[in-house]
């Protein structure tokens, strides 16, 4: 993969400023600078680069995967670009460690992919605190469209069982694959989807107000509520009902 041809930036200097809140169109300008300069890059630059190198390859579904870990009392952050195609998951990116970057399309489920990263973190004596998985990234973004970094947030330091977390990941992966337009809200505390918070008003109607999807349980199970939106495209995550169901502890 072309991204792996870039050297990792060990200098401690930031050669390129990446604004996570910038539009995809604006980030494309930074990618052009990265390719022209051919300087060492870090994981965030590599993820943005991978997004644009795969732009237009619509057989690939893409989403960001962000990690927060702890080692010797220090917090470390890492991000890669998750990809899905033909029933298999993988990832693109760069890292100081070879087992925390590129993953080939060999994983039949999202939970297996995340578990592979989890084992790699443990192998480097890092305590994984949380993993954040974004929403699918459009191959045809609007002018003001941004990368949605927060689709679901999964804490690994709250005592949840591996089975519970895998269930959440596998259900969310069906949404990423496009095989379901329903997210089942389990009664698993502190696992939430922050990306459905109210979006800033923009010119495109697809960015109208969206209700935040949290994990707080409604008064009655199986109560369905729809997100407010106007289109059924990936980018607006529309008509996404929330079904509450009890999860055996």
Image (cartoon, rainbow, N blue to C red):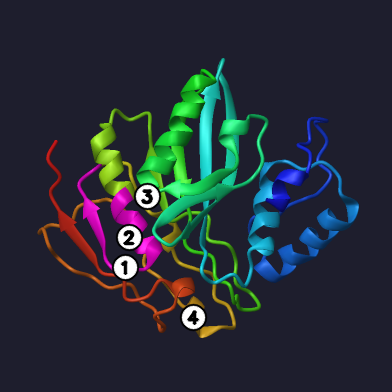
- CB contact under 8 Å: marks 2 and 3: no
Q: Tell me, yes or no, whether the highlighted magenta stretch contains residue 178.
A: yes
Q: Please name the residue that numbered disc 4 is placed on.
A: 206
Nearer-N-terminus badge (2/4) = 2
Q: Is residue 64 left or right of residue 222?
A: right
Q: State the SS at label 1.
A: loop
Classify mark 4: residues with Cα within 10 Å, few (<14), some (14-19) or many (20+).
many
Instruction: Point out which mark residue 179 bears.
Output: 1
Q: Please name the residue that numbered disc 2 is placed on.
A: 174
| Label 2, label 4: how far apart the Cα atoms are | 23 Å
Classify mark 2: residues with Cα within 10 Å, few (<14), some (14-19) or many (20+).
some
Q: Is residue 145 left or right of residue 160?
A: right
| In this rendering, the label closer to the viewer, 1 or 4 | 1
Q: Which of the 4 image quadrants contains residue 141? A: bottom right
| Label 2, label 1: how far apart the Cα atoms are | 5 Å
Nearer-N-terminus badge (1/4) = 1
| Label 1, label 3: how far apart the Cα atoms are | 15 Å
Q: Tell me which residue sits at (52%, 29%) in the image.
A: 69
Q: State the SS at label 2.
A: helix
Q: Which of the 4 image quadrants contains residue 228? A: bottom left
């Amino acid at each position: 993969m072309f991204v792996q041809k870039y050297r990792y930036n060990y200098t401690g200097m930031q050669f390129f400023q990446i604004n996570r809140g910038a539009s995809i169109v604006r980030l494309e300008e930074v990618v052009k600078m990265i390719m022209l300069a051919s300087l060492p890059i870090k994981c965030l630059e590599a993820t943005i680069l991978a997004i644009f190198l795969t732009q237009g390859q619509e057989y690939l579904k893409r989403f960001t995967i962000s990690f927060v870990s702890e080692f010797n009392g220090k917090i470390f952050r890492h991000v890669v670009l998750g990809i899905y195609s033909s029933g298999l998951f993988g990832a693109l990116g760069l890292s100081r460690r070879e087992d925390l970057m590129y993953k080939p399309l060999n994983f039949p489920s999202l939970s297996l992919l995340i578990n592979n990263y989890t084992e790699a973190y443990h192998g480097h004596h890092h305590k994984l605190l949380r993993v954040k998985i974004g929403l699918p990234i459009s191959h045809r973004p609007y002018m003001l469209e941004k990368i949605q970094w927060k689709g679901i947030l999964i804490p690994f330091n709250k005592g949840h069982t591996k089975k519970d977390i895998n269930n959440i990941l596998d259900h969310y992966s069906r949404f990423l694959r496009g095989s379901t337009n329903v997210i089942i809200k389990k009664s698993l505390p502190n696992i939430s989807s922050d990306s459905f918070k109210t979006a800033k008003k923009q010119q495109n109607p697809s960015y109208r107000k969206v209700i935040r999807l949290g994990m707080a349980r409604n008064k009655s199970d199986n109560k369905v509520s729809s997100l407010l939106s106007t289109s059924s495209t990936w980018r607006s995550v529309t008509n996404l009902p929330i079904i509450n169901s009890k999860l055996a502890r």
